[in-house]
Image (spheres, rainbow, N blue to C red):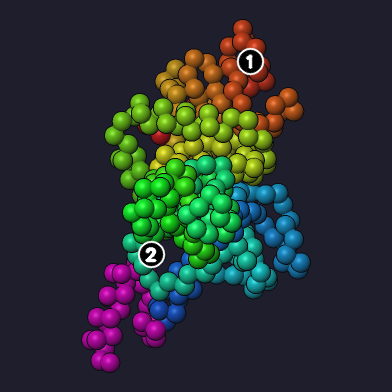
């Protein structure tokens, strides 16, 4: 290849990937580096714990649970460190959260360039909208379950027959390749996306532009929050088996197409910004040091609390005249936040 041809190939690569390498090996070095940088995977286990750190000698969690992922979620896999065990992966989620997961929970997708992350296929993804849902071997309520998935897992919608559709069945494929049938009422369109891996924080701006009716959006947030009422508190939890405070509000927003920061804080680059207490409306967020809740209006809020008197998703009030008033929270609010 001539120098002119090599320069042309290098320019094409740089435009398609956004990565530029100034070295003698030219595109060969760039392709090798790109393969390392652009590794992705899909969660295949029904629930995948994410930890903040892992001990390199024995692979045992060295800290508390940070987050939970469910089947069908896309992750970006970082280059392993020299001391990292092969049975653990260091990943970034599709909402920008980082940590370690067991390699057995992930199906690897080695992609060679940006923009080729199964976008067309992932447009067919649906979200499980019930706490749990069985994927049956055939469209019959008496059939055995090939898999059971948690709420907010993603499945790929396949073609079913007219009769199956008329009978209320949908044919789906799970992230691990399992195919089967599910009651159609347990499926909802996926509203969030994976574009964080292509555009970074620009996706927050895109998701807000899709909200055409703010009042309707707020009502849906509150409805979603109420659907988790009574779910037990679990540190780092983000599933119907248990939720922590930030996992709870994160899921309410994700199910409605907006990805907020996973922890109990407002972080730059994410859509929630501080507002006055007087400006707060239903669906907005309330922050304390290490805690977050959703405002319901009329001085009431819903949250996942580890308080020994409730330890679940529950409703409390800022009004001292109400039975569910909590003085410890009413007197220690640090901020109110909104995406609007």
Residue 5 on the magenta segment: yes
Residue 55 percent location from the top left of the image: 73, 62
Q: Could you tell me if residue 243 is visible in this image?
A: yes
Q: Quadrant location of residue 38?
A: bottom left
Q: Quadrant location of residue 264?
A: top right
Q: Quadrant location of residue 121?
A: bottom left
| Left/right of residue 221 with respect to residue 208 in the rendered view | right
Residue 263 percent location from the top left of the image: 57, 41
Identify the mark at residue 325; answer none if there is no mark. 1
Q: Could you tell me if residue 74 is visible in this image?
A: no
Q: CA distance from mark 1 to mark 2?
A: 49 Å
Marks 1, 2: nearer the viewer: 2
Residue depicted at x 29% and y 69%: 15
Q: Secondary structure at mark 1?
A: loop
- In the picture shown, does residue 144 fall above or below 298? below
Residue that carries the numbered disc 2 in the rendered image: 118
Residue 310 percent location from the top left of the image: 70, 26
Secondary structure mainly formed by the magenta segment: helix
- N-term-proximal mark, 1 vs 2: 2
Identify the residue at the far top of this view.
321
- In the picture shown, does residue 140 fall above or below 1? above
Q: Secondary structure at mark 2?
A: loop
Residue 2 on the magenta segment: yes
Quadrant position of the N terminus in the picture = bottom left
């Amino acid at each position: 290849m001539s120098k002119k041809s090599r320069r042309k190939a290098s320019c094409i690569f740089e435009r398609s990937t956004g990565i530029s390498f100034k070295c003698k090996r030219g595109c060969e070095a760039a392709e090798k580096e790109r393969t390392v940088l652009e590794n992705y995977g899909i969660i295949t286990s029904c629930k995948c714990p994410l930890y903040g750190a892992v001990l390199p000698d024995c692979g045992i969690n060295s800290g508390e649970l940070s987050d939970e992922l469910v089947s069908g979620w896309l992750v970006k896999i970082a280059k392993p460190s020299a001391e990292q065990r092969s049975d653990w992966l260091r990943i970034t989620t599709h909402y920008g959260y980082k940590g370690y997961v067991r390699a057995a929970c992930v199906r690897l997708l080695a992609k060679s360039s940006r923009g080729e992350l199964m976008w067309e296929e992932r447009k067919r993804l649906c979200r499980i909208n019930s706490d749990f849902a069985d994927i049956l071997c055939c469209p019959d309520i008496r059939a055995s379950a090939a898999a059971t998935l948690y709420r907010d897992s993603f499945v790929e919608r396949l073609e079913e027959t007219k009769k199956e559709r008329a009978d209320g069945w949908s044919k789906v494929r799970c992230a691990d390749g399992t195919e089967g049938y599910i009651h159609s009422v347990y499926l909802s369109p996926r509203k969030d996306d994976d574009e964080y891996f292509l555009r970074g924080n620009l996706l927050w701006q895109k998701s807000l532009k899709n909200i055409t009716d703010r009042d309707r959006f707020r009502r849906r947030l509150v409805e979603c929050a109420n659907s988790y009422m009574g779910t037990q508190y679990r540190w780092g939890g983000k599933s119907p088996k248990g939720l922590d405070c930030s996992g709870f509000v994160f899921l309410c927003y994700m199910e409605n197409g907006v990805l907020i920061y996973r922890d109990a804080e407002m972080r730059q680059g994410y859509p929630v910004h501080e507002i006055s207490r007087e400006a707060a409306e239903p669906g907005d967020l309330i922050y304390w040091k290490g805690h977050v809740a959703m405002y319901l209006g009329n001085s009431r809020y819903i949250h996942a609390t580890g308080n020994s008197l409730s330890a679940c998703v529950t409703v409390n009030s800022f009004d001292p005249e109400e039975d569910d008033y909590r003085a410890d929270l009413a007197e220690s609010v640090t901020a109110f936040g909104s995406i609007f």
